[in-house]
Image (cartoon, rainbow, N blue to C red):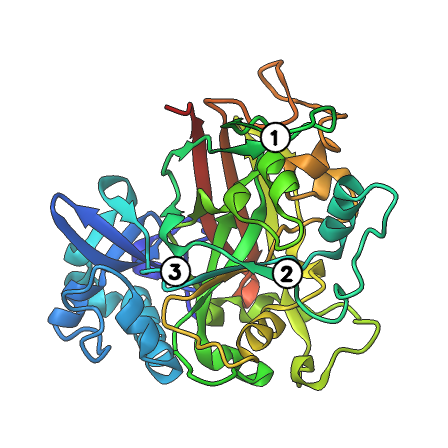
Amino acid sequence: MSGAAWLELAEGEPFGVENLPYCAFGQDRFRWTGVRIGDRILNLAAAEGRGLVDAGGAFLGQGTLNRFMAAGRPVWARVRERLVELLSAGRYQESIEPLLLSVADVRLELPFEVADYVDFYSSEEHATNLGRLFRPGGAALLPNWKHLPVGYHGRAGTVVVSGTEVPRPYGQRKSPDDDAPAFGASLRLDIEAEVGFVVGVPSEEAVAIDDFREHVFGAVLVNDWSARDLQAWEYQPLGPFLGKSFRTSVSPWVVPLDALDAARVPGPPQVPPVLPYLRAGEHYGYDIGIEIFWNGTLVSRPPFAGMYWTPAQQLAHMTVNGAWARTGDLYASGTVSGAEAEQTGSFIERTWNGARPIQLADGTARSFLLDGDTVTITATAPGAGGARIGFGEVTGTITKPE
């Protein structure tokens, strides 16, 4: 893939032609879909309207990516190839330059209409850590964990784009010293750094594991905000509910799966062997490096490459019972954590349930989130030709309950 010479991108630009993530953006009362190149966005509706891109009308009049995502892999591939050509060859500069907008001058929107939301629990390190914290003295991993991708059904209506404020949630919480629960604002508010995958092509039958790439359009960063005190009281026996459903933040850029081809790595060995519907022809994950910043201080670097359950296995399991996959379905990996404290993707792990507070650069210490705290999650991955692929960021600030 050639570089975008006429755009004069900086060396190491994470949003070069090797990436080309899609987005939705607004100006004044209008909203369009676009693709990012460097620090600018190409208005795809304008490009298609002028005959520069042929997406079968998928961008015209659209404020989200859903119609384009539903068009399928042949259209995705054709449009991507054409975008690389338009943004690389100098002969297109005169046609394309008037259609480019500065990222700083637009309002980034939720890039797709979320049809449904499922969150998995696919890091063995994270599941082990939470098992030890939530079930002291018991088994860290429950018997089913290595046989299927454990997950819960979230709330599509509270998925928000990066930058949206996160109100501190209310609910029931219970101290071990209390006979009855109390109601109030969460006192143990946390994050979960994850990678989400977005379904493009729908299916009314189970998606075979080797058909993953035919259905999944791309990936986003996810922060699955978590109220640990609400979660600990409610989650048995049916799992998370109010402790999770109040907000889930996603990055505004959808990185196409094709941009992540160079980031594919072998998936970890799975022992005991998984059932046939979870066995892929190629068992692979993605080498995505995540960084978490708490009020500007880098506090963790979770490695996505080691996730026990892969995105293809998650989609296969999610639909194997006959549940439909719909355009705009979002499913998240679950918290990404590594073996070291500095690789954990949640603050309950990073501080070991508050016992080891984190010292921030401003001299303060934190165990769980305070009102006014801001968390930003970023990520990059290897790209074609030695490039680095950027996911941008997902950020949110905690606001006081009303």
Q: Secondary structure at mark 1?
A: loop
What residue is rendered at 33% in x and 60% in y? 112
Q: Can you tell which of label 3 and label 1 is closer to the viewer?
A: 1
Res. 181 mark: 1
Q: Vertically, is 305 above or below 341?
A: below
- The reply to whether callout 3 and callout 1 are in contact (CB within 8 Å) is no
Quadrant location of the N terminus in the rendered image:
bottom left
Q: Quadrant of residue 195?
A: bottom right
Q: CA distance from mark 3 to mark 1?
A: 46 Å
Residue 334 rendering spot, x and y as whole percentages: 60, 55
Q: Amino acid at mark 2?
A: Asp
Q: Earlier in the sequence, mark 3 or mark 2?
A: 3
Eyeballing the image, is 81 above or below 156? below
Which badge, 1 or 2, is on the more N-terminal residue? 1
Image location (x, y in percent) of residue 175? 68, 27
Q: Secondary structure at mark 2?
A: loop
Q: Give the quadrant of residue 280.
A: bottom right
The residue indicated by pointer 3 is 21
| Residue type at numbered disc 3 | Pro
- How many numbered circles are shown? 3
First in residue order: circle 3 vs circle 1: 3
Viewer-side residue, 345 vs 149? 149
Q: Residue at x 24, y 77 (%)?
A: 55
- Which residue is more in the foreground, 69 or 330? 330
**Label 3: which secondary element:** loop
* Crowding near the residue tagged with mark 3, few <14, some 14–19, many ≥20 C-alpha atoms within 10 Å: many
Q: Residues within 10 Å of mark 2 (few under 14, many from 20)?
A: many
Vertical side of 228 occupied by 260: above or below: below
- Amino acid under label 1? Pro
Give the residue pinned by disc 2. 287
Residue at image point 69% right, 27% down: 179
